[in-house]
């Protein structure tokens, strides 16, 4: 019979584990409770491990992005980068002035005196 605590193989005639001393003649409810407790502990450990891995992955991605951001540098003052399909894209200055066009009102404005 295998011990539920340490998984040591014991002869069927002993009542206590020869390695850890745990009781071997357990009832069905005790065995079930032990197995359920062990499964819950394994699930909690696995969840904790997955959370740590996800956090580490997020930190690594953040640091890589931060490094690439600082390694790229900044454009010259007043210049804007124009993305292009060619490898020779450069910074250029763009002069853009927005002047809205004012149109006449559709509804005429009238003032009346009383």
Image (cartoon, rainbow, N blue to C red):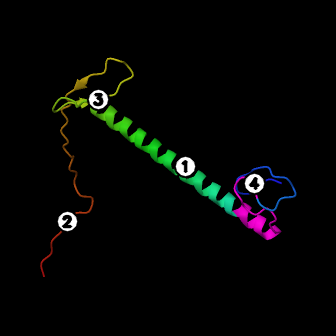
| Numbered circles on residues, count | 4
How crowded pointer 3 is (Cα within 10 Å; few <14, some 14-19, many 20+) is rated as few
Residue bearing mark 3: 71
Name the disc covering residue 18, or none.
Answer: 4
Q: Which residues are magenta?
A: 17-36
Say which residue appears at 22% left-offset and 63% top-offset: 108
Observer-side mark, 1 or 4, equals: 4
Residue 26 position, x and y percent, is 80, 66
Residue 25 position, x and y percent, is 82, 65
Observer-side mark, 4 or 3, equals: 4
Residue bearing mark 1: 49
Per the image, label 4 sits on a secondary structure element best described as loop
Say which residue appears at 75% left-offset and 50% top-offset: 8
How crowded pointer 1 is (Cα within 10 Å; few <14, some 14-19, many 20+) is rated as few
Per the image, label 3 sits on a secondary structure element best described as helix
Chain-order first, disc 2 or disc 4 = 4
Chain-order first, disc 1 or disc 4 = 4
Q: CA distance from mark 2 to mark 3?
A: 59 Å
In this view, 53 is above or below 28: above
Q: Is residue 28 magenta?
A: yes
Per the image, label 2 sits on a secondary structure element best described as loop
Q: CA distance from mark 2 to mark 4?
A: 104 Å
Residue 79 position, x and y percent, is 20, 30
Residue bearing mark 2: 109
How crowded pointer 2 is (Cα within 10 Å; few <14, some 14-19, many 20+) is rated as few
Compare residues 111 and 6 and report the one nearer the observer: 6
Q: Is residue 111 magenta?
A: no
């Amino acid at each position: 019979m295998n011990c539920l605590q340490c998984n040591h193989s014991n002869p069927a005639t002993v009542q206590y584990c020869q390695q850890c001393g745990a009781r071997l003649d357990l009832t069905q409810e005790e065995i079930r409770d032990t197995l359920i407790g062990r499964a819950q502990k394994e699930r909690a450990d696995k969840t904790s491990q997955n959370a740590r891995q996800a956090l580490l992955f997020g930190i690594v991605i953040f640091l890589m992005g931060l490094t690439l951001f600082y390694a790229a540098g900044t454009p010259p003052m007043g210049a804007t980068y124009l993305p292009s399909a060619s490898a020779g894209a450069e910074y250029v200055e763009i002069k853009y002035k927005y002047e809205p066009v004012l149109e006449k009102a559709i509804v005429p404005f009238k003032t009346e005196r009383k």
